[in-house]
């Protein structure tokens, strides 16, 4: 029997090394986790809205009506003042002197009229007896008339002087919130112009002026006309004011006026809305969004705005199919409701979407869905 020769030692070593280098391939990584939620389905109001600036229902500029030096500022800046409340005192002494002078002129005119009346009374019986000429009598009558006119002019000058004197006490023309003072004691005001002293805003009702697109105005006006024809209980819809911190003002507003014409440069029309402001929380100059519901969509589909991918005017969402793969779906986005977006086309009520990390998924990708709730705030 023939014996086989053993393999060389070097060859055995090489085979052993090759076997040692061959390792099993690592298992594929698990599908990435993504946050998933079902779309929201509910009835939603359809709003038109615009950003505007608040103002008082009445904005009053308090100005100096006479020239003089300010003696005192008699109010606290930023406080509520009443109608007729003293705000400023202007040095009254020049005007007091003018009143005294005017009174002297009135007294002189009254004395002149008294003399003229005496002459007429004395001449009247004499002219009847031909004791004096009729010309002398008629002259005395004309002098009396001139004295009466002079007295009227003197009284008018006295009235004007007293009015000017009254203007040295600057009172609030209406109740409201007074702003900061523009002048201080020692300031010369009223020289050559009516110097602005301060401003007063009436804020029991706060007004907001906004410019809305012509299309939105037409939509609102048509819906209001439809409700009017059908005899709806709510012909004019209530407006809402969303403040800068995202909260909604508790009081509902109403339309005050619509401007007479559309701005041809911007294609917008100015409207003003009034909101009750009993607590005085809202001040003039704040910014807020005014909105009004013009319709209601039944069974609307909503998704979080962060779940929508926008690229060059097209919108898409990542739909998680029953086999946990991704389907990138083109959608038509509609109105926004809080942090949610109404989807007009492209989604069904029972579908689930990726609500966070849509940029990380790709069509057909396998994922591990993690259910999360959708916040509507």
Image: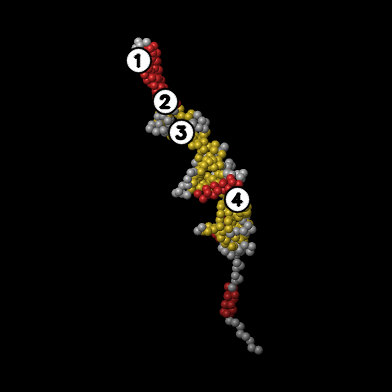
Label 2: element kind = helix
Measured along the vertical axis of the image, is residue 123 above or below residue 270? Answer: above
Which is more N-terminal, label 2 or label 3?
Answer: 3
Which is more N-terminal, label 3 or label 1?
Answer: 3
Measured along the vertical axis of the image, is residue 181 above or below residue 109? Answer: below
Q: Disc 4 designates what residue?
A: 296
Nearest to the eye among marks 1 and 2: give it: 1
What residue do we see at 52% from left, 42% from top?
257
> Mark 2, residues whose alpha carbon is within 10 Å: few (<14), some, or many (≥20)?
some
Nearest to the eye among marks 3 and 2: give it: 2
Which is more N-terminal, label 2 or label 1?
Answer: 1
Residue 322 visible to an observer of this rendering:
yes
Measured along the vertical axis of the image, is residue 346 above or below residue 11? Answer: above
Label 1: element kind = helix
Q: Disc 3 designates what residue?
A: 62
Label 4: element kind = strand
Measured along the vertical axis of the image, is residue 334 above or below residue 186? Answer: below
Which is more N-terminal, label 4 or label 3?
Answer: 3
Label 3: element kind = strand
Q: CA distance from mark 1 to mark 4?
A: 94 Å
Tell how many labels. 4
Nearest to the eye among marks 3 and 4: give it: 4
Nearest to the eye among marks 1 and 3: give it: 1
Q: Which mark is on residue 160?
A: 2
Q: CA distance from mark 4 to mark 2?
A: 63 Å
What residue do we see at 62% from left, 58% from top?
348
Q: Horizontally, is 121 left or right of 206 in the view?
A: left
Q: Horizontally, is 58 left or right of 151 in the view?
A: right
Residue nearest the observer in this picture, 244 or 104: 104
Tell me residue 62's x, y (percent).
Answer: 46, 33
Nearest to the eye among marks 1 and 4: give it: 1
Image quadrant where one finds the N terminus: bottom right
């Amino acid at each position: 029997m023939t014996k086989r020769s053993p393999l060389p030692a070097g060859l055995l070593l090489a085979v052993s090394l090759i076997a040692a280098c061959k390792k099993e391939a690592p298992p594929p990584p698990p599908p990435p986790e993504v946050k998933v939620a079902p779309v929201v389905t509910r009835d939603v109001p359809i709003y038109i809205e615009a950003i505007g600036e608040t103002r008082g229902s009445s904005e009053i500029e308090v100005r100096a009506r006479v020239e003089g030096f300010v003696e005192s500022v008699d109010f606290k800046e930023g406080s509520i003042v009443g109608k007729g409340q003293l705000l400023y005192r202007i040095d009254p002494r020049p005007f007091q002197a003018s009143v005294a002078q005017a009174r002297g002129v009135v007294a002189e005119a009254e004395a002149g009229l008294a003399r003229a009346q005496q002459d007429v009374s004395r001449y009247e019986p004499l002219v009847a007896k031909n004791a004096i000429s009729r010309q002398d009598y008629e002259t005395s009558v004309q002098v009396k008339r001139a004295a009466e006119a002079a007295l009227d002019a003197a009284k008018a000058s006295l009235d004007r002087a007293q009015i000017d004197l009254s203007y040295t006490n600057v009172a609030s023309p209406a109740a409201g919130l007074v702003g900061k003072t523009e002048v201080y004691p020692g300031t010369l005001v009223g020289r050559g112009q009516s110097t602005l002293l301060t401003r007063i805003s009436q804020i029991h009702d706060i007004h907001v002026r906004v410019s809305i697109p012509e299309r939105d105005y037409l939509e609102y006006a048509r819906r209001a006309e439809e409700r009017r024809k059908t005899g709806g209980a709510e012909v004019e819809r209530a407006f809402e004011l969303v403040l800068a911190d995202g909260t909604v003002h508790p009081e509902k507003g109403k339309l005050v006026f619509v401007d007479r014409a559309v701005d041809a440069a911007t294609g917008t029309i100015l409207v003003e809305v009034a909101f009750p402001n009993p607590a005085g929380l809202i001040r003039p100059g704040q910014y807020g969004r005014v909105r009004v519901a013009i319709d209601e969509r039944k069974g609307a589909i909503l998704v979080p705005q962060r779940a929508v991918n926008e690229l060059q005017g097209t919108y898409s969402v990542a739909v998680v199919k029953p086999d946990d793969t991704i389907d990138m779906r083109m959608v038509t986005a509609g109105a926004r409701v809080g942090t949610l977006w109404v989807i007009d086309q492209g989604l069904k009520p029972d579908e689930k979407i990726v609500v966070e990390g849509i940029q990380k998924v790709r069509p057909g990708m396998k994922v591990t869905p993690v259910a999360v709730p959708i916040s509507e705030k």
